[in-house]
Amino acid sequence: MNSTTEIDNLKREFIFTLRKKFPRDSSSSIAIMTVNLIRKIIFRENPKTMTDLQVSLANHCKRLHAAERSELIIINIGLMISKLARDEVLQKRGGGEPEPLYTLWRDDDETTERLRTADMKKIRKDLQASIKELTTEIESSRECIASQSTELLFNNDIVMVHSLATSKTMHAFLTHAVKSGRKHRVIDIVDEEEQLESAPDFVTPIELYEVASRMPETSKVVLVAAAYFPDGSCLVPAGGHQIALLAKRHCIPVYVLAPFYKLCPFFMTDPDSLHSFRSNTLPFDLSAQMTGHVDCLHPAFDCLQSDLVTLFVSNTSCIIPSHVNRLKEDYYHSQDIADY
C-alpha cells in the first residue's frame, strides 16, 4: 500500500469517526484527533521542503473541513502546525524576530527563499517534538481554564450557566470553584426536561423560558464558546444570545470559556454559513404529516457580538474582546493565513 492510499484511508477513517459519534465528542478530543492525523500525514508524505509541507497541510485541511463544515478546529490545528514548522525553520536558519500579525505585507524575499530551500529532514525531529507539545497544551487547557474560576467567582455569587451537561470545560470550571471553597449558587439552563433530574448537586436547573425572571437575581453569567473570532464575536450553544441580551439589559458580566484551539484566525463574514442544525425532537407521526409543509429549524449555535461579551477566559488569562485579534499572533502566522 503506497503512502497516498494510506493517507486517504486515514482521512476517511477520521471523517467516519466524527460522523459516527453521537453525541459529539468534546472539542479537545477532536483537536487531539486532528493533531494526530496531521502528524501521521506528515510522517507518511515526507515533504522535502517547507513549501511542500505548507501546500500539503492547506490542501488536506481544506478537504477535511469541506467534509465537516461545522468543525472549524480542523483549520485551526492545521494552521497552528504550519506556524510551528515555520518557526522551526527560521530558528534553524537564524531567522530574526517574527513580524507582527497585523502587518499588511507578506514575507520578504530573504525569508521566502529561506523557507523554500529549507531541508525538512533537519527539522523533522524538532517539529515532531513541537507537535507533541501542542497536544500536551490542548490536554491541559481544561485544567488551566478551571484554575481561573477562583479569580472570577466569589462567595455569595449567583452564577447562571448554559450547557453544563454537554461541556466538560464548564463542569471543570464550576467544580474547581466549589472545591476551592467558593460558596456560591449555580443556576443551570437545561435544554431538555431529562436534564432537570440529572443535574449536579450544586446546581439549580431551570429551563430557557425562566431566564428572564431569574436574571435580576444573577450576579454573573458563564457561557462556553464553540468558536471565537478576531473581531471578538463568538459562537455559543443555542439560547446563549437571548441570555447575553438579558445580561446586558441588567448590567451583568458575561464570561465565555474559550480554549486557544477554538480561536479562528478568520473574521466571520457570513454567520449563517457556520450554523449547523440539530434534529427536531418531534414525534414521528407528526414529523411525517408536516414533511414538505413546514420547516422546523433547530439551530445548534447562536452568534454573540463582541459587545455582549465581558471577558474570554482562555488558557493563560482573561481577555477582553477587543484584544482577541492580538492573541491570534501567538498561534498563527500572517503569511499562512494569507495563503490559505
Image: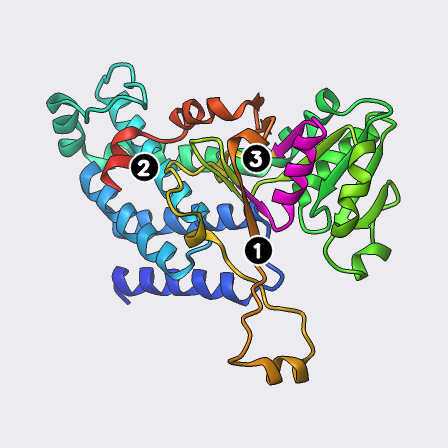
Residue 149 numbered mark, or none? none
Which image quarter holds the C terminus? top left
Query: Could you tell me residue 304's position as x and y percent?
Result: 55, 39
- Within 10 Å of disc 1 (Cα), the crowding (few <14, some 14-19, many 20+) is some
Q: Identify residue for label 1.
A: 300
Counting residues from the N terminus, which is met first, the one under dot 1 or under dot 3?
3
In the drawing, does residue 178 fall left or right of residue 58? right
Counting residues from the N terminus, which is met first, the one under dot 2 or under dot 3?
2
Q: CA distance from mark 1 to mark 3?
A: 17 Å
Asked whether residue 49 appears in the rendered view, the answer is no
- Within 10 Å of disc 2 (Cα), the crowding (few <14, some 14-19, many 20+) is many
**Front disc: 1 or 3:** 1
Which image quarter holds the N terminus? bottom left
Which segment is the magenta one?
Answer: 235-256
Amino acid tagged 3: Ala
In the drawing, does residue 283 fall left or right of residue 105? right
Q: Quadrant of residue 251?
A: top right
Q: CA distance from mark 2 to mark 3?
A: 22 Å
Q: 129 and 72: which one is in front?
A: 72
The answer to whether 328 is drawn above or below residue 269 in the figure is above
Secondary structure state at the residue bearing disc 1: loop
Counting residues from the N terminus, which is met first, the one under dot 1 or under dot 2?
2
